Amino acid sequence: MFKLIGAILLISTCGYVGWQVSRSYAHRPVELRQFMSALQMLETEIIYAATPLPDALSGIAERVDTRVSSFFAQAAKELKTTRGSSAREAWSAALDRYRADSTLDRGDLGILNSLGYNLGISDRDDQAKHLRLTLEQLKMAHARAEETAVKNVKLWNYVGLLGGMIIVLALY
Amino acid sequence: MNGVVQVKPGMHSRGWDEVLPVLPPNLEKMIARLPDHILARLEEIRLRRDRPLVLGAGGQDFFLRRDGQPDSIPESAYITSGDDMEKVIHNISGASIYALEEELRNGYITLPGGHRVGLTGRAVLENGQVKTLKYLSGLNIRIGREIKGTAAALLPRLLDQAASNIHHTVIFSPPRCGKTTLLRDLVRLASSGVPQLNYPGRTVGLVDERSEIAGCYRGVPQMDVGVRTDVLDGCPKAQGMMMLLRSMSPDIIVTDEIGKMEDIVALEEVFNAGVRIIVTIHASSMRELTNRPALKYLLQLNIIQRFVLLGRSRGVGTVEKILYGNEVPPRR
């Protein structure tokens, strides 16, 4: 009886771990898409409305999905509260905070971080170029993320469950 | 002019404490430590990249030593660094240079409180027109001070009691005689009304092409321009007058520094609509006024009832002369 309960616990735990790993793979493309639509909003704000960055960022935070929203809210807050800190500093500080509970990998974060170097410091045409470049790069990252997601989501679900079963068998 | 005129101490508002926060912390501290009598008269803070910091107060300028003491020689003066410039530009633009294209083209930015920052750098041209400025290397932070009451003595002579409105008025003077300051106060009184004069106040439409009269920050006047005043900020005068006429049904239309023929044509439309005008003109005498073709035409219309000449004979903003329309000799 105890053996049976132990086996079920072991299998479900391993299954859960596998599911968690697979979920992070499944979430990365979603998160990238959210960033892409947020940056598209930022582009509109900058190019057509010429909204100053703090306002533009907090406006976006209100409109995008909760996960990405926290990043934009943080960046806006950094810009508004710390006087004299540049947009680059505010952007990367917000990104540092965001990193912890994100499924983005280092490459994705690098793309976003490099946008910060150019944000707000030039005229509208130039801002548009940098935003488009970032969007292009995110698009490519998104395609790659989709690919790895297709491969890994199923894989890790199985690895978790099967791994649990193998351990159970080995222990019997 | 921008309200930066000399008046007796005590009439000043504390403009400087609204301006200092745009400076980098080290400069802010240095300037805030200056003696009160200098701070109270502080008019300008000039930052030039890699050159000494210059402050202007009471019509004179001086340097600031690295230890924060005012000094008249530039040798030991604080040198404005590139980093200082960047921080100031960051602060005045809200970290968004792209939002300032129009301002960069015009060469100045209005701050909250109606203060202005003049800008120089390298002009970027497009089709022979200045598109924007880059490599900003010179900043002049001008502390605007609103002086209320300068037009109070003048107003009774401009009032048309029969119509309970203001006569068509032209204010003219050489530069730096307080035209804008006087005009701003006149707008305030004409709009809010003066019960003692039995004048209830009228709807005023103000075309503020250079943001000098109302000192708008994001469209909101930072100076008191009266309760019944609509401000078209940054709008070309001739177009702005027509827009106000069509959309806001003003009783009085106000603008400054007219002189082009298109301005006069727009003014004619305003006259025809039965709306009163108050305008300012750069000119030091009636003769100079009539020498300019557009203004000569305006006089030939024979519709302006009050000409106010300002000077500095008893300080900035002295009303030297008020001519009535019928006193102006007829012109061919």
Image (spheres, rainbow, N blue to C red):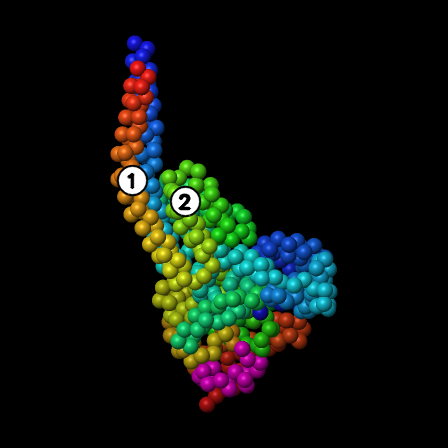
Q: Which residue is mark 2?
A: A106
> Would residue B62 be seen by someone viewing this image from the given angle?
yes
Residue depicted at 39% across the width and 76% down the height: B127
User: Considering depth in this image, is A42 or B153 the residue closer to the camera?
Assistant: A42
For the residues marked 2 and 1, what is the alpha-carbon distance in whole angstroms?
Answer: 16 Å
Q: Is residue A157 above or below residue B319?
A: above
Residue depicted at 63% across the width and 71% down the height: B316
Q: Position of residue B274 (x, y in %)?
A: 40, 71
**Badge 1 sits on which subunit?**
A
The type of residue carrying mark 1 is: Ala
Residue depicted at 70% across the width and 54% down the height: B33
Report the magenta stretch's main SS. helix
Q: Residue A152 sits in which quadrant?
A: top left
Q: Residue A156 sits in which quadrant?
A: top left
A137 relative to B44 in the view: left or right: left
Q: Which residues are magenta?
A: B282-300
Q: Is residue B144 above or below residue A8?
A: below
Q: Position of residue B234 (x, y in %)?
A: 45, 66
Task: Label 2, secondary structure: give it.
Answer: helix
